[in-house]
């Protein structure tokens, strides 16, 4: 998307201002579909930092994610408990942490998708 969708920017801004992580969203970016819940950037950064701190190999990278957010209108969506939809499965099954540039989102819908064997 050459100009970010104003409605999507407003959704992201409300997640940021309310510090809520309950907004479920599914987006298409490039040829990838990502589904999950949005988190405020600061919360997302802290979770990523905590995971990295616990890693023997990646612990030194945790401080990069502890940096303060820049403020202003949101430029990225921060997903947690998210999956990339691939065929009939969501990867990873337990959900991951994804950061997506709002300007790269070509379409989106409120809600997340789940798979079942039925």
Image (spheres, rainbow, N blue to C red):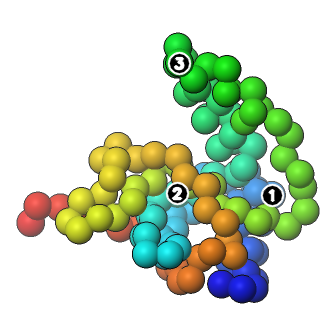
Q: SS for tag 3?
A: loop
Crowding around mark 1 (Cα neighbors within 10 Å: few <14, some 14 to 19, many 20+) is few
Residue bearing mark 2: 37
Work out which residue is located at the far left of the displayed protein and give it: 118
Residue 26: which disc? none
In the foreground, 86 or 24? 86
In x, y percent, where is residue 54? 54, 17
Please report whichever mark, 1 or 2, sits nearer to the chain's N-terminal start.
Answer: 1
Find the distance from the CA under tag 1 to the CA under tag 2: 16 Å
Could you tell me if residue 7 is visible in this image?
Answer: no
In x, y percent, where is residue 117? 11, 61
In x, y percent, where is residue 34? 45, 65
Please report whichever mark, 2 or 3, sits nearer to the chain's N-terminal start.
Answer: 2
Residue bearing mark 1: 17
Which quarter of the figure has residue 86?
Answer: bottom left
Q: SS for tag 2?
A: strand
In x, y percent, where is residue 6? 75, 83
Find the distance from the CA under tag 2 to the CA under tag 3: 28 Å
Which quarter of the figure has residue 10?
Answer: bottom right
Residue bearing mark 3: 57
Q: Quadrant of the N terminus?
A: bottom right
Could you tell me if residue 116 is visible in this image?
Answer: yes
Would residue 24 be found to the left or right of residue 14 on screen? left
Above or below: residue 62 compared with residue 83: above
Which quarter of the figure has residue 53?
Answer: top right
Work out which residue is located at the far top of the displayed protein and give it: 56
Residue drawn at point x = 52 percent, y = 68 percent: 25
Crowding around mark 2 (Cα neighbors within 10 Å: few <14, some 14 to 19, many 20+) is many
């Amino acid at each position: 998307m050459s100009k970010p969708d104003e409605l999507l920017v407003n959704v992201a801004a409300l997640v940021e201002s309310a510090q809520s992580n309950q907004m479920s969203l599914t987006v298409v970016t490039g040829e990838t579909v990502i589904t999950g819940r949005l988190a405020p950037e600061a919360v997302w950064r802290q979770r990523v930092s905590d995971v990295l701190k616990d890693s023997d190999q990646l612990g030194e990278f945790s401080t990069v994610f502890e940096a303060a957010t820049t403020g202003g209108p949101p430029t990225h969506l921060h997903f947690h408990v998210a999956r990339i939809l691939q065929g009939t499965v969501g990867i990873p099954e337990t959900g991951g942490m994804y950061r997506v540039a709002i300007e790269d989102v070509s379409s989106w819908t409120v809600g997340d998708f789940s798979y079942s064997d039925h």
